[in-house]
Image (tube, helix red, strand yellow):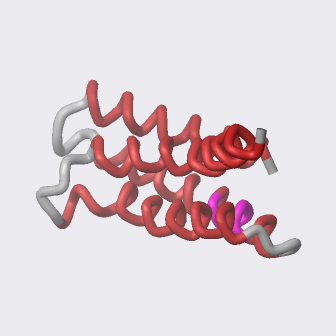
Amino acid sequence: MTGLRITLAALGAAAFAAAALIGRPQVFAPLAVLGIAAFVVAAGCLAADLLPLRRGHALCSALSLADAILLAVGGQFTRLPAIAPALVLVLLQAAPALAALGVRRHAS
């Protein structure tokens, strides 16, 4: 499971770098490929989170699915900066670990 989250974070970081370094409209090709790859990995991540059910992780995986769609096609149809979905994808992968860390800290 952690491997899938690391893969999603790496795809998000690659998309972030592409969005930061490549101008429009050339950036749409790498973002489309990275978005499709992120969608496939996020679907696997969601499946792994649903059995056994881990609500927080599953929510982050479901949001990653939606974000991967935005990453792949969002910048072409909206004025949303291409860098935003890439950053959100990376943050969504860190959220379950940060939430678990916060729970452990308050339990101590």
Identify whether 58 is placed above or below 86: below
28 to the left or right of 47: left
Q: Residue at x 38, y 35 (%)?
A: 16
**Residue 104 location in percent, x, y?**
75, 42
Q: Is residue 85 magenta?
A: no
**Residue 22 location in percent, x, y?**
25, 30
Which secondary structure is most common in the magenta stretch?
Answer: helix
Q: Residue at x 57, y 48 (%)?
A: 95
52 to the left or right of 10: right
Instruction: Confirm whether residue 7 shows in the render.
Output: no
Identify whether 49 is placed above or below 23: below
**Residue 28 location in percent, x, y?**
29, 48
Highlighted magenta segment, given as a residue range? 42-46
- Corner quadrant of residue 98: top right
Identify whether 36 is placed above or below 105: below
Q: Residue at x 12, y 57 (%)?
A: 79
Return the residue nearer the eye: 91 or 99: 99
